[in-house]
Image (cartoon, grey):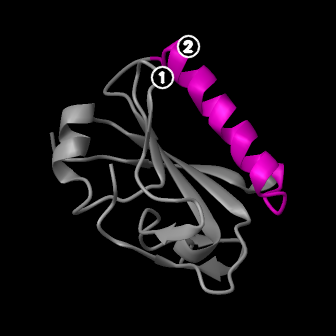
Amino acid sequence: MKSAVNSSRGTAPIDTIIVHHAGCNVGIVLSTFPSQKRPHSMIDTDGQIVKLCRDLRSAAHAGKSRWKGVIGMNPSSIGIEILNTTGVYPEAQYLALLGLLDRLTSNFSSVESWNIIGSQRHWNK
């Protein structure tokens, strides 16, 4: 799948990964993507990773964000959306996230472990 809205990062280095929790199912995400939320990747409860935007592009996933004095995190971050309506994350989802984080931090050495952060959003169901 491809997000319709993404842009060049310009000169901003990729130094942050933002892991978002979406309290909804894949059907809602697919019906709103790419018109509303645009992370680089999403992970379903079965561990399937769907890539929506190339990591080297800026995706509109962080909205009005601020971290360590930076306002507007989209140009310097990679967004991952974890889908889960309720309860504990399944093991397959955790393993997929850990594998993706390992690949991203290997590819982008500028991402320090303390710059892997989380946020939560609630979508209309």
Is there CB contact under 8 Å for labels 2 and 1? no
Q: Is residue 110 magenta?
A: yes
Question: Magenta stretch mostly in which secondary structure?
Answer: helix
Residue at horizontal 70 percent and vertical 68 percent from the top: 14
Q: Which residues are magenta?
A: 88-113
Residue at horizontal 62 percent and vertical 21 percent from the top: 95
Where does label 1 land, which residue?
Answer: 47
Q: Which element is circle 2 on?
A: helix
Q: Position of residue 82 (x, y in %)?
A: 45, 37
Q: Position of residue 84 (x, y in %)?
A: 37, 28
Q: Residues within 10 Å of mark 1 (few under 14, many from 20)?
A: some
Image height of 62 relative to 70, above or below: above
Where does label 2 land, which residue?
Answer: 91
* Residue type at the position of mark 1: Gly
Q: Nearer the viewer, mark 2 or mark 1?
A: 1
Image height of 89 relative to 4, above or below: above
Q: Which mark is residue 69?
A: none
* Residue type at the position of mark 2: Glu
Along the horizontal axis of the image, is 45 left or right of 77?
A: left
Residue at horizontal 64 percent and vertical 72 percent from the top: 76
Residue 49 vs residue 125, the one in the foreground:
49
> In the image as oriented, which residue stretches furthest toward the bottom?
11
Residue at horizontal 32 percent and vertical 36 percent from the top: 23
